[in-house]
Amino acid sequence: MNWILFIIGRNWAQRIIVLGAIALYLYLLISKPEIARKGFRGALSSFFGLVPLIFAALLIAQAINILLPDELIIRWFGKESGIKGILTGGILAGLLQGGPYAVYPIIQSLFQKGAHISIVVTMLIGYGAIGLSRIAYDFIFFEPQIIGLRLLFAIPLTIISGIILYFIL
C-alpha cells in the first residue's frame, strides 16, 4: 500500500494532480501518441533538471532545522515575538531566493521548530507577494512603475495580513 501512496500522493491535492496527469497522458497516448511521447520526454528532462535543486533545498531546510536552536526560532518567530516576528518573517520570506521547492521546506522547518502559525502564513504571503527574486522577471514584462507599485503594496499588505492573523490566531 505504501508504494501506491508514493506513486499517487499522500493527500487528495497530490492525487488529483497525479491522477489527472495519468488520465491526460492515457488520452494523449490513444489520440496523439507523438505529442504524448514529446510531453513525457520534456517532463523527464525538467524533472532531472529540478532534482538537484529540490534535494539541495531539502538539505538546506534540514540544516536549518538541525543548526538553529529552537529557542532562537521561538524568540524571532514564536507567538511572543509579536509584531517584530511578523515584520521579520514577512520581509525575510520576501527576500528568499528560489522557487517553492526551495523556500517552502525552509519555512516548514521554521514552523516545526516553533514559529507561530501567523508568522508562517505571513512568510508564505511575503514570499508570494514581495518575491524579490522575481524582480528580474518583472523587468522583462513590465515597466518600472508597475514593479514599484507591486512592491509598494506587497510589503504593507504582507505586514497587515500578518498582524491580522497574529491577533486572530
Image: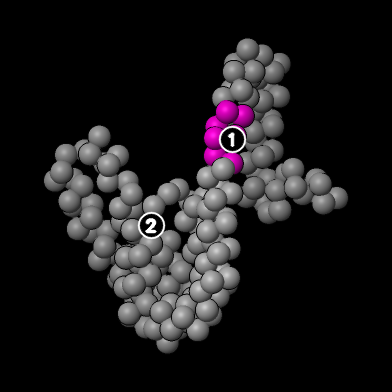
The image position of residue 5, as x and y in percent, is 77, 49
Residue 49 colored magenta? yes
Q: Is residue 47 above or below residue 101?
A: above
Name the residue tied to disc 1.
47
- Circle nearer the N terminus (1, 2): 1
Q: What residue lies at 31% left-to-right and 73% top-to-bottom? A: 87
Q: Secondary structure at mark 1?
A: helix
> Between residues 58 and 162, which one lies in front from this camera angle?
58
> Between residues 73 and 149, which one lies in front from this camera angle?
73
Q: What residue lies at 46% left-to-right and 69% top-to-bottom? A: 120
Q: What residue lies at 57% left-to-right and 28% top-to-bottom? A: 45
Q: Secondary structure at mark 2?
A: loop
Residue 120 colored magenta? no
Magenta: main secondary structure equals helix
The image position of residue 149, as x and y in percent, is 18, 52
Q: What residue lies at 54% left-to-right and 50% top-to-bottom? A: 56
Question: Which amino acid, mark 1?
Answer: Phe
Dot 1 surroundings within 10 Å: few (below 14), some, or many (20 or more)? Answer: few
Name the residue tied to disc 2.
96
Q: Which residues are magenta?
A: 44-51
Dot 2 surroundings within 10 Å: few (below 14), some, or many (20 or more)? Answer: some
Left or right of 20? Residue 154 is left
Question: Which amino acid, mark 2?
Answer: Leu
Q: Is residue 106 above or below residue 80?
A: above
The image position of residue 27, as x and y in percent, is 68, 22
The image position of residue 12, as x and y in percent, is 67, 51
Left or right of 4? Residue 112 is left
Q: Residue furthest bottom?
A: 80
Can residue 91 be seen here? The reply is yes
Can residue 169 be seen here? The reply is no
